[in-house]
Image (cartoon, rainbow, N blue to C red):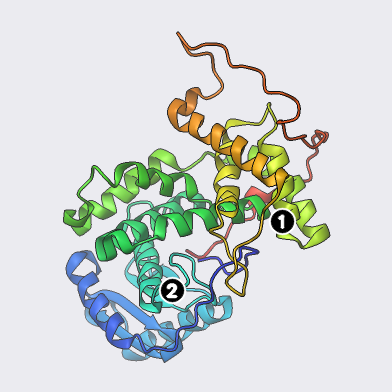
Amino acid sequence: MTLKTFAPLPQNTGGKSLTEVFNREVNKALTDFPQLQGRFVFINAPENTTVTDVDKRMLGVSDYQLDDIVDKVKYEAEKAGSSMATKLGRDSLDVLVYTPLPFKMFTGKDQTPEMEAMAVFDHELGHLVVPGGYFSQDPTLRETAADTFAVLRHIQRYGEESKAIEKAGWRRAFDFVISGDAGHFTMLTLDEVTKIKDKLDIKNMSPQQTADLASRLALEHTPHADVTNSIAYEFEAVRQTMRRTRNIEMAMKTLADIILDDKADYYAIKIGGRALLPFLKGEVRNADGTPYGLKGAYWNSVRDELNTKLDQMDKEGLLFGMPIKGAAPKAEQPEAVKIAPLPRRPQTQDHQGWKHWFKAA
């Protein structure tokens, strides 16, 4: 899980003990995924509790060695300020540590701390049980597998109450635009879950089917590094604006100028639009709970043009911007409606954002 973000997210206030909840969920995980039995450790760092299902004879560890492992992994998670999952001893011991972030990533302001904690728990569990979630050589695929598993499980738990796809997908898109770091860029796959959730009986999927589907979706939709590298460069001006002004609205204006350029890249529109649209819909809020006020003639024009582009993209998919048989030629927009693009910058080798990947899952 990523701690650093400029995304305006609701605070994760916590305050309620989750020990009983985690005891229940660990038992359920051991039943759902028998491969964890005899080799699983769960650490609830803030409450300093541990649940273990470890066959010490099978794994060849003593009580002292197991306690030492727990202490070291807990320390690393607390130092990182984030939950994490790891496999130790040549894939012989699975360890999951819960350390809550100070903000909510999968849930809304008025949803319970338990709903957020379950999404985080399932994300880390996904690293351990989804094929590719831990051992893939592609760190973006690892995080995509875990995020996809988490949102599927969240829908199974909470049905229509779950906002995990919308919340996590937006945060992953926003963070990628603002940081250029593709290590946790999972939005493209999360949005694919939206397309299938109404025709798939997610509630009645078995745990293993859930893990398998998360793996399939991750393999199918995790973007290649060439895509994220190229688009990260396209968004460099947004990062420059953010560094210079520390003003999200100014950064979003720069983003709008890029993605509404007539020559904007397909993926720039898709990813940038995902980051920008919730601001335009009043769904992103300030720390005091009020919506970001992107109002006025400029933002109304941006909203209309972006909605038109995204609707067209939904209809045409990868053929967006290509000549379609039987379609009438697209009318040229009047100059007054067009959003003035930023000047194109010469390419350099300065941007290496997609290479700065996290090691810990």
| Residue displayed at 64% across by 50% down | 177
Q: Which residue is mark 1?
A: 249
Q: Which of the 4 quarters of the picture holds residue 9?
A: bottom right
Tell me the kind of residue under disc 2: Asp
Is any part of residue 214 visible from this angle? yes
The image shows residue 267, relative to residue 55, as above or below, that is: above
Q: Earlier in the sequence, mark 1 or mark 2?
A: 2
> Is residue 17 or residue 299 the one in the foreground?
299
**Disc 1 to disc 2, how far (Cα)?**
24 Å
Q: Secondary structure at mark 2?
A: loop
Question: Is there any visible trace of residue 235 in the rendered image?
Answer: no
Residue lying farthest to the top in this orientation: 326
Q: Residue furthest front?
A: 297
x and y percentages locating residue 199 in the rendered image: 24, 42
Given residues 70 and 166, the one toward you in this image is 166
Q: Which residue is mark 2?
A: 110
Q: Is residue 69 left or right of residue 103?
A: left
Image marks 1 and 2: residues in contact by CB distance under 8 Å: no
In the image, 145 versus 90, the foreground residue is 145
Q: Amino acid at mark 1?
A: Glu
What residue sits 45% from the left and 68% below the top? Answer: 108
* Residue 75 left/right relative to 213: right
The x and y percentages for residue 347 are 79, 35
- On the image, the x and y values in percent for residue 75 come to 52, 83
User: Which residue is at a point 62% across and 16% down the rendered structure image?
Assistant: 331
Q: Measuring 68% from the left and 43% from the top, which residue is drawn there?
A: 256
Q: Position of residue 32 (x, y in %)?
A: 19, 65
Assess disc 2: are there few (<14), some (14-19) or many (≥20) residues with their C-alpha within 10 Å of its C-alpha.
few
Look at the picture and state if 261 lies above or below 319. Answer: below
Q: Residues within 10 Å of mark 1 (few under 14, many from 20)?
A: some
Compared across the picture, whether 236 is left or right of 169 comes to: right
